Amino acid sequence: MDRCMCCCAPCKPRYRRLLTFFAISRPEKLDRIGEYIVARLARDLYHQRYNQVKISVEAMDQLLQSCHDLSSLNQFIGHFLRMLQKLLETNDFQMEKLATDSFVNFANIEENTPAYHREYDFFISKFASMCHANSSSQNAKDVRYAGLRGLRGVMWKSATDPLQTSIWEKEHMDKIIPSILFNLQDDEDSGDVREKGKRFSIIDQPYPMDGVAESPKALADQFLRVKDPSFVIQALITHLENMSTSNASVRIGIAIVLSSIVSVAGTSIGPSLIGIFNSLLKHLRQSVEFQQTKECPSEAQEKIYQESLINAMGDYAYALPDYQKVEIMLFISANIPNLGKDSRVLKPSDAFLQHILVKTLLKVATKYKTGFMSTIFANNFPNTLLRLAVSADPVTRLDTQNIFHTLLD
């Protein structure tokens, strides 16, 4: 073994191929090979022989790529992860970057054998701490970028391995999410990212994306752009439910995020479409009722919150096919209060809610392109608009006329 590794010391391609051939031919030796390389790397790190360290990492990477189908790979990966841990513990950026690159390569390998006892706790903590590097030098930005790449690799490896579920626990999410959000605050690179329209998902491609994101901010933004955002939307609505009694600024922030995420969602909002709109309408109604009470600290803030919810519903409607936009308009019109009675005699709260819902209806209508009149002017929808056209509120009457013009043009 020593003789074999001495041949590999100059990192000659021929000897690396011989080492790989030996490992594939004698898979039972793979565990001992990994153990030896890690021991040698530890000695080289201690003596600061960084060129030799790089050679050891390259050898481990090549063995991992070539032997990923072997049944003895699990033991070798244990040595491989210990090697990366030693590199990350040096707190030397060149070694940290070397370890990050190696870990991302490892994350891109599909294993054929289950890993029952593998944990990534150290890597989550280390990569998360790298994401918070805050010195003013360019090196700090590189460290943060490497940390985000490492976290992305951990996320990918956990997402593709059904046995690795612990990453979704609160303990780990409390480290991952703040690390992502911290890098979203980097305004320096906000205008420098090429191909902003070209978005990827962390759960789709962990490694080929590295040439796309050029800054920590851009890479952090990609973390939040998932392929199927329906579960994120539902989680945000649940969060809005939990924060329904919070300060208006908090609710405004959640509503703005809801509105923004639709640009990524496209038509994949999910099956619970009416449920989403029902939840948003419920929050809109609650805000309107709260605004009419004496407990409301700021009517201006509540109006901003209501506008944010209306914009979110309009953005949702824009992302939907036309037949679903019709369903949404019918659903909103069915929730407008007291249309079956004399609409000129309304309580102030109902009149205000009616005005807000008509405004919401107009927002959705502007996203719809009328193909056939019979599609939209069916059921009770025309009668609803006619009742609104004689409302006591002049703003409601004007919005109703705009709805007619929008749908008929």
Image (cartoon, grey):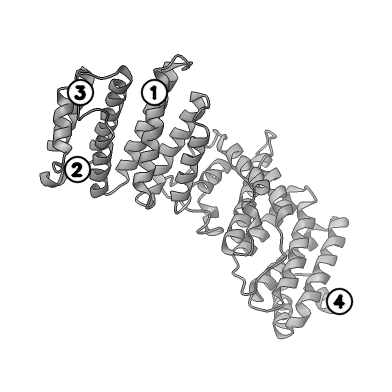
Q: Would residue 142 appear left or right of 369 to someone viewing this image? A: right
The residue singled out by tag 1 in the image is: 289
Please tell me which residue lies in front, 129 or 303: 303
**Crowd around label 1: few <14 · some 14–19 · many ≥20 (10 Å):** some
In this picture, residue 160 sits left or right of residue 23: left
Q: Earlier in the sequence, mark 2 or mark 4?
A: 4
Name the residue at the bottom extreme. Answer: 25
- Looking at the rendered image, the disc whose residue lies closer to the viewer, 2 or 4, is 2
Seen from the viewer's position, the closer of residues 397 and 278 is 278
Which one is earlier in the sequence, the residue at label 1 or at label 2?
Answer: 1
Residue 376 appears left or right of 150: left
Alpha carbon of mark 2 to alpha carbon of mark 4: how far?
Answer: 74 Å
Residue at mark 3: 343
How far apart marks 3 and 4 lie (CA) works out to 92 Å
Residue 233 location, quadrant: top left
Q: On residue 210, which mark appears?
A: none
User: Disc 4 designates what residue?
Assistant: 2
Task: Identify the residue under disc 2.
Answer: 369
Q: Where's residue 208, x and y in %? A: 53, 59
Compare marks 3 and 2 and give the one earlier in the sequence.
Answer: 3
Compared to residue 383, the image places residue 35 above or below, namely below
Instruction: Say whether residue 339 is visible.
Output: yes
Three-letter residue code for mark 3:
Ser
